[in-house]
Amino acid sequence: MIRPRSGNFIYSNYEIEIMEMDIDAIRASGLNGVVFGANLDNLKLNEKVLESKYFIIVFQGMGKTLHRCFDLVPDINEGIETAITLGFERILTSGFAKRAIPDGIPNLQKAVEISSGRISIMPGSGINSGNISELLKIKGIIEVHSSCSKINKTNNENNLKRLIDFGFSNGVPSRKTCANEVRQLKDNLKRN
């Protein structure tokens, strides 16, 4: 994923240059796809950035996924049509909600209907082995994104307090991918 910092997706020219360097590194390492996006101040997709000559040239032959900047666009129809016009293969989205399940379900369904198979709608955010079957009830969902993470158990209260005191943490416990959760999610996908 190309994202020069946390926070919003409204980038300065300097941050766009950083994104370009990151993409160069991805291409040089042999990866075949990239996840990225950018918004304008009004939260519409930043077409100027996303269709710049640089990105068009550098993405030649690479898969393109629009990340969750899509969840901020003011109009779902316009956002999907813009993503299609810009040549994205898929949109990673929570359905305009904090979590895809349950709050994003109505907009995920709407996005699948609007896209009509012209672009893949890939739900993400809060998806796990316990709720994946609910998501797969939406006809047209063919791929999902999940971190399959659990709270890092090394974050006991004493450790977390020290991390906060030293400025190494914002107080939110870190998470790490859980192999068992990956297996359970995979098994549930096979059953559905």
Image: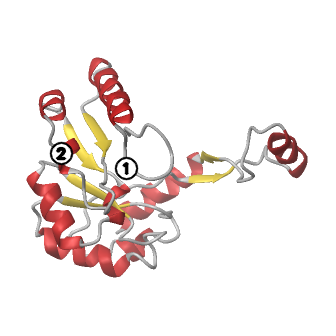
Q: Is residue 53 visible?
A: yes
Displayed quadrant of residue 73: bottom left
State the residue at coordinates (31%, 44%).
Answer: 36
Q: Provide residue 45's location: percent of width, then percent of height.
A: 24, 56
State the residue at coordinates (15%, 42%).
Answer: 51
In terms of secondary structure, where does tag 2 sit?
A: helix
Amino acid of disc 2: Lys
> For this rendering, which residue is in front, 176 or 44?
44
Alpha carbon separation for disc pair 1 and 2? 12 Å
Provide the residue designation for mark 1. 10
Displayed quadrant of residue 74: bottom left
Horizontally, residue 97 falls left or right of residue 37, namely right
Provide the residue designation for mark 2. 48
Q: Provide residue 154's location: percent of width, then percent of height.
A: 79, 43
State the residue at coordinates (81%, 40%).
Answer: 163
Displayed quadrant of residue 30: top left
Horizontally, residue 102 falls left or right of residue 60, namely right
State the residue at coordinates (37%, 43%).
Answer: 11
Q: Provide residue 40's location: percent of width, then percent of height.
A: 29, 55
Mark 1 Cα shell of 10 Å, populated few (<14), some (14-19), many (≥20): some
